[in-house]
């Protein structure tokens, strides 16, 4: 992937040399041309066409934002109940993710889902211990969204 | 417009008071660390609204720095409570 | 006219952020124990700060035509570190044996914790 970015920059600079005009406009035009050429020869590259992983990362970031918005509203509703009837508790969640980065991302995402904060990660990275705000509901919501998160994270971190 | 900004500033000042109440009252040490963490967020918000009042871009570094300092101090406090020291002197 | 409308919109975004901060401060007082308060301080407060910083960012683009990368970096940093600090606080609280509230109905971590405490104590001794 860094190689592809370098090739793209090289094509942009070559474009500026050929046009003999040194401005940001020419540079952007050359960059777009380079992107198009890389798109044409993408099959002969050893790694994926490089905007695609970036798009996946942006997709993951959007999931983060959406979860934060949802959970903020849910927590605000729970706080503003006239009488607090919460049943908090700690439950265990198993995960199939292996690498450190993946588990970290999953823990951050789960912390952002409605009504759950990750308390502890077991040393072998297999179990997450999660504190739920309102237990049966948050257990269900975490279990439901876990598969979706794991798939999105895998798409970013693995080829 | 100014009125809405003043209203939001008032709300944030009230939340700072509530957080300080928790900081003083908190039964255990982690409670107080949590209140300090939240206080950092609220100070960031106050600074952001204040920059709009005086129409100056000079305080953006302050926002960034308070964010970083608040995070680092929270992590250091948490490590200190957990292990009794904050910085590993034995490097391996 | 339209410029004024958009400016008003950014101020309303700031007001929404302030309301979220206020709600989380109420939660910080009302909720019964540290772990439930962590929910309030990690989610509602983060959302409030993000809304306020976003409103400031948009306001300076519209009013002064000033695209501030520093503020964008600040938004990104706060967004990234808030869950981590909530996790650290909860973890150190559990390790220093802060009690859960009485209405808690389940604690999966308690039985596993004895084993781990022994392990980490050995690790510290070395």
Image: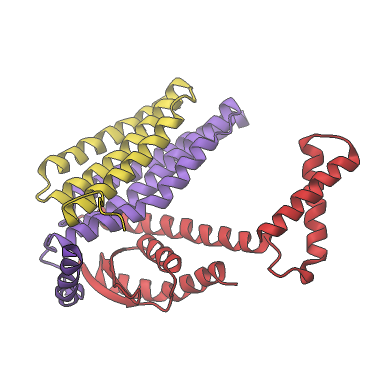
User: Is A89 in front, or is B12?
Assistant: A89
**Residue A83 visible from this viewpoint:** no
Taking the image as shown, residue A16 lies to the left or right of residue C40, namely right
Name the spot of residue C29 as percent of width and height, x first: 18, 47
- For residue B22, above or below residue A119: above
Q: What shade does chain C have?
A: purple
Q: Which of C126 and A104 is in front in this view?
A: C126
Let me know if residue A28 appears in the view: yes
Which residue is located at x 13 percent, y 49 percent? B29
Residue A144, picture quadrant: bottom left
- Which chain has been coloured red in this picture? A
Give the camera-side residue of C1 and C60. C60
Q: Which residue is drawn at 11% across and 62% down?
A: C99
Q: Position of residue C81 (x, y in %)?
A: 38, 50
Quadrant occupied by the C terminus of chain B? bottom left
Residue at the spot 22% in from the left edge and 70% down from the top edge: A90
Q: In which quarter of the image is residue C50?
A: top left
Q: Where is residue C46 in the image (x, y as percent from the top left)?
A: 37, 48
Numbered disc total:
0
From the viewer's perspective, tell me whether residue C5 is left or right of residue A134. Answer: right
- The residue positioned 29% from the left and 58% from the top of the image is C87
Task: Give the quarter of the figure containing the N terminus of chain B.
Answer: top left
Q: Where is residue C125 in the image (x, y as percent from the top left)?
A: 16, 64
- The answer to whether A119 is drawn above or below residue C69 in the figure is below
Of all chains in the rendering, the one displayed in yellow is B
């Amino acid at each position: 992937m860094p190689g592809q970015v370098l090739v793209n920059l090289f094509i942009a600079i070559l474009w500026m040399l050929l046009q003999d005009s040194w401005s940001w406009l020419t540079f952007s035009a050359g960059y777009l041309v380079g992107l198009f050429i890389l798109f044409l020869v993408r099959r002969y590259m050893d790694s994926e066409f490089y905007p695609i992983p970036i798009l996946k990362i942006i997709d993951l970031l959007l999931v983060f934002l959406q979860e934060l918005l949802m959970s903020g509203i849910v927590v605000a509703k729970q706080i503003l109940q006239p009488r607090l009837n919460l049943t908090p508790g700690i439950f265990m969640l198993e995960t199939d993710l292996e690498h450190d980065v993946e588990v970290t991302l999953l823990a951050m995402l789960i912390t952002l889902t409605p009504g759950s904060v990750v308390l502890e990660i077991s040393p072998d990275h297999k179990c997450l211990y999660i504190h739920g705000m309102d237990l049966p509901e948050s257990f269900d919501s975490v279990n439901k969204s876990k598969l979706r998160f794991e798939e999105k994270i895998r798409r970013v971190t693995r080829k | 417009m100014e009125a809405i900004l003043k209203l939001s500033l008032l709300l944030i000042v009230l939340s700072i008071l509530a957080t300080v109440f928790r900081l003083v009252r908190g039964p255990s040490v982690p409670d107080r660390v949590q209140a300090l963490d939240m206080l950092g967020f609220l100070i960031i918000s106050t600074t952001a609204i204040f920059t709009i009042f005086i129409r100056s871009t000079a305080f953006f570094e302050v926002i960034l720095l308070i964010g970083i300092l608040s995070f680092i101090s929270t992590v250091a406090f948490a490590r200190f409570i957990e292990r009794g020291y904050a910085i590993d002197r034995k490097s391996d | 006219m339209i410029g004024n409308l958009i400016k008003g919109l950014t101020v309303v975004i700031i007001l929404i952020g302030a309301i979220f901060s206020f709600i989380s401060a109420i939660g910080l007082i009302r909720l019964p124990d540290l772990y439930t308060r962590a929910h309030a301080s990690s989610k509602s407060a983060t959302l409030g700060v993000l809304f306020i910083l976003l409103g400031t960012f948009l306001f300076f683009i519209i009013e002064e035509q000033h695209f501030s990368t520093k503020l964008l970096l600040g938004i990104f940093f706060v967004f990234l570190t808030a869950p981590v600090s909530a996790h650290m606080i909860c973890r150190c609280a559990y390790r220093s044996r802060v009690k859960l509230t009485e209405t808690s109905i389940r604690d999966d971590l308690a039985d596993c914790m004895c084993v781990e405490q022994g392990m980490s104590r050995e690790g510290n001794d070395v």
